[in-house]
Image (tube, helix red, strand yellow):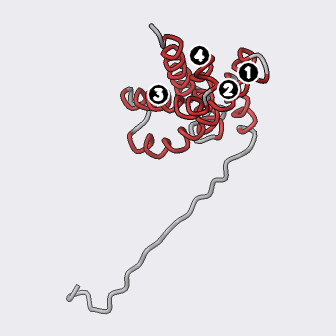
Amino acid sequence: MKNKPLVVGIFSGIAYGLIARLLVELSDKDFFETMTIGFLFVTPAIIGAITVYFGTDKQRKSTRFQIMMPWVSIAAFLLVTMITFLESTICVVMLLPAFLLSASVGGVIMGYAKKAASQSKALSIFLFLPIAVNSVESQFSNPQKTYRVKTEILIKADKGTV
């Protein structure tokens, strides 16, 4: 198969995303949550980086490939999360722009990492980045406030009319 490495990259990206999403589902809520920078921006960037990592040398050199190919992995990952009921359709629709942008950034970074250093070292660092970001992020408390709203409608009429 001509594009076997690319298919491996796409499925590896999907698998990584699903593992991250399952970690969110199964972990202590103070450690790894969905509404964090680590999950919303770093995880899709890693999925994009994994996709580009498995591309051929010719593909990895293409900026178009670095930006667009991670979208395939993200779309497939989000489709799988909807099929498995890990995410609802509205969540996926709202996540899609941020995930696509983050995945493209991750793909471009991986494309340049190939030129700068050993790509396997770059991928190893990337893989654990969401956990590192979330461990730092979990040190900060989420602002929480409770509000009470009371609504009154005054009608200028006697009880019998109303």
Q: Residue sitting at 20 percent across and 88 percent down?
A: 160
| Up/down of 123 relative to 107, above or below | above
Mark 4 and mark 1: span between their CA atoms?
Answer: 17 Å
- Of the numbered discs 1 and 2, the one sitting upstream in the chain is 2
Mark 3 and mark 2: span between their CA atoms?
Answer: 19 Å
- Of the numbered discs 3 and 2, the one sitting upstream in the chain is 3
Front-most of 103 and 64? 64
Task: Give the residue number, with chain letter if any, for mark 3.
Answer: 77
Pointer 3 with pointer 2, Cβ within 8 A: no
Front-most of 101 and 58? 58
Tell me the number on the disc at residue 23. none
Q: Quadrant of the C terminus?
A: bottom left
Q: Amino acid at mark 3?
A: Phe
Looking at the image, residue 89 sits to the left or right of residue 105; the answer is left
Pointer 1 with pointer 2, Cβ within 8 A: yes
Pointer 4 with pointer 2, Cβ within 8 A: no
Mark 1 and mark 3: span between their CA atoms?
Answer: 22 Å
Task: Give the residue number, with chain letter if any, for mark 4.
Answer: 56
